[in-house]
């Protein structure tokens, strides 16, 4: 599925079974967090592997998509 | 600028001064790596903070863009 709601009510986008993109607000700043999760006592928790992008960095990532896709195609 | 070439000849997309997206092939598998870099002796090196996405995970991320953007707008 494309998205799910976790125990905190956060809507998330699943990249794979244990990788998610979540959008969260921390001290007034919004982050797009791309992160690995792990299961503990039937609850999925955020792991250390990942990166929290600011909205500006998220926008820069979107701007780079065509270039990234070109490189992926070249490398494949 | 949108992209730059590092010392290894890898073309990268810059998200900010010290965050980059690089596309690389490792043991025959292509990864889209979203990562923090740090400067040491005038060379930029990949740091520990970041995540390497497989091409399938990268595709899932792209599929999730509209949903992520919706959540960013809601949270802002």
Image (cartoon, coloured by chain):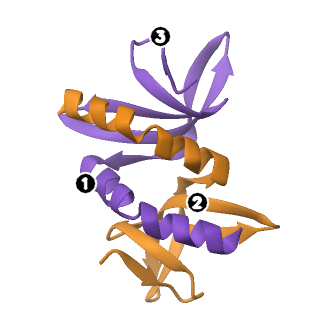
Chain colours: A purple, B orange
Q: Could you tell me how many numbered marks the image carries?
A: 3
| Callouts 1 and 2 close, C-beta under 8 Å | no
Category of crowding for the residue at label 1, using alpha-carbon neighbours closer than 10 angstroms: few (below 14), some (14–19), many (at least 20): some
* Residue B59 screen position, x and y as percent: 57, 47
Residue at label 1?
Answer: A56
Tag 3 subunit: A
Category of crowding for the residue at label 2, using alpha-carbon neighbours closer than 10 angstroms: few (below 14), some (14–19), many (at least 20): many
At horizontal 56% and vertical 23% (from top left) the residue drawn is A45
Sequence-earlier tag: 1 or 3? 3
The foreground one among A27 and B54 is B54
Q: CA distance from mark 1 to mark 2?
A: 19 Å
Tag 2 subunit: B
Q: CA distance from mark 3 to mark 2?
A: 29 Å
At horizontal 46% and vertical 70% (from top left) the residue drawn is A67
The foreground one among B75 and A39 is B75
* Residue A18 screen position, x and y as percent: 65, 31
Q: Which mark is residue A7?
A: 3
- Secondary structure under tag 1 reads helix
The foreground one among B51 and B4 is B4
Q: Which mark is residue B22?
A: none
At horizontal 21% and vertical 27% (from top left) the residue drawn is B74
Dividing the picture into quadrants, the one containing residue A57 is: bottom left
Tags 1 and 3 both on a single chain = yes
Residue A39 as seen in the image, left or right of residue A71: right
Q: CA distance from mark 1 to mark 3?
A: 28 Å
At horizontal 58% and vertical 60% (from top left) the residue drawn is B32
The C terminus of chain A, quarter of image: bottom right
- Secondary structure under tag 2 reads strand
Farthest residue, direction right:
B27
Residue at label 2?
Answer: B32
**Considering only vertical position in the picture, is B73 above or below A61?**
above
């Amino acid at each position: 599925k494309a998205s799910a709601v976790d125990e905190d009510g956060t809507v998330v986008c699943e990249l794979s079974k244990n990788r998610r993109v979540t959008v969260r607000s921390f001290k007034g700043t919004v982050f797009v967090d791309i992160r690995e999760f792990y299961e503990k006592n039937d609850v999925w928790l955020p792991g250390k592997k990942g990166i929290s992008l600011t909205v500006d960095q998220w926008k820069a990532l979107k701007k780079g998509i065509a270039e990234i896709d070109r490189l992926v195609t070249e490398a494949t």
